Image (tube, rainbow, N blue to C red):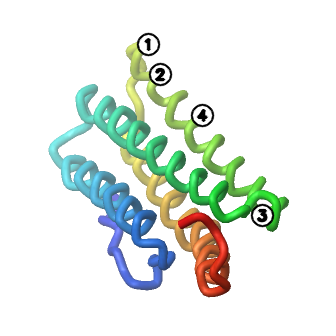
């Protein structure tokens, strides 16, 4: 059984809005993990994909808005492209899970949750932390629109 994600300061990007949203994503996933011992259900699968996907899309939009405001795509082309591609791939994967649920397929929710945990923690600890460093440098230099 997956264990809850333990939030820690190493996960902080230094961008208050993004860190707050990351905590919501982690808490949402931890709520799902807490529900797993009660048995996999269509309702739980729907909640995973609906709640997590909708909030993740909101979060990705916020991150991408900051990328635009700070000129991240222009300044860090390859890194920014990988970051955006990760968002796209995650969204497509979760949407694919939603489609499976809508077709009545039973999902192995433990595997789904492990995928979500690994993706979220890996994305925060690698990709988002690099973006956070960029934004902090830009802010220290007095650049950016925020």
Q: CA distance from mark 4 to mark 3?
A: 20 Å
Look at mark 2 in the image and give the residue it sits on.
100
Look at mark 1 in the image and give the residue it sits on.
103
Query: Considering the numbered disc 4 on the image, is that residue within a helix, a strand or a loop?
Result: helix
Q: Earlier in the sequence, mark 2 or mark 4?
A: 4
Q: CA distance from mark 2 to mark 4?
A: 12 Å
- Quarter of the rendering containing residue 33: bottom left
| Image coords of residue 67 (percent x, y) | 64, 58
Look at mark 4 in the image and give the residue it sits on.
92
| Image coords of residue 143 (percent x, y) | 66, 75
Labels 2 and 3 touching (C-beta < 8 A) = no
Q: CA distance from mark 1 to mark 4?
A: 16 Å
Viewer-side residue, 63 vs 108:
63
Q: CA distance from mark 2 to mark 1?
A: 5 Å
Look at mark 3 in the image and give the residue it sits on.
79
Viewer-side residue, 33 vs 25:
25
Q: Is residue 101 left or right of residue 4?
A: right
Q: How many marks overall?
A: 4
């Amino acid at each position: 059984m997956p264990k809850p994600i333990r939030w820690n300061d190493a996960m902080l990007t230094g961008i208050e809005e993004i860190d707050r949203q990351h905590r919501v994503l982690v808490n949402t996933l931890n709520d799902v993990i807490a529900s797993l011992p009660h048995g996999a259900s269509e309702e739980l699968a729907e909640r995973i994909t609906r709640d997590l996907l909708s909030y993740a899309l909101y979060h990705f939009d916020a991150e991408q808005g900051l990328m635009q405001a700070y000129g991240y795509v222009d300044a860090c082309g390859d890194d920014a492209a990988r970051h955006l591609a990760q968002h796209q791939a995650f969204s497509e994967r979760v949407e694919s899970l939603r489609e499976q649920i809508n077709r009545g397929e039973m999902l192995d929710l433990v595997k789904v949750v492990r995928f979500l945990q690994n993706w979220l923690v890996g994305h925060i600890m690698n990709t988002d932390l690099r973006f956070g460093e960029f934004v902090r440098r830009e802010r220290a230099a007095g650049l950016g629109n925020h």
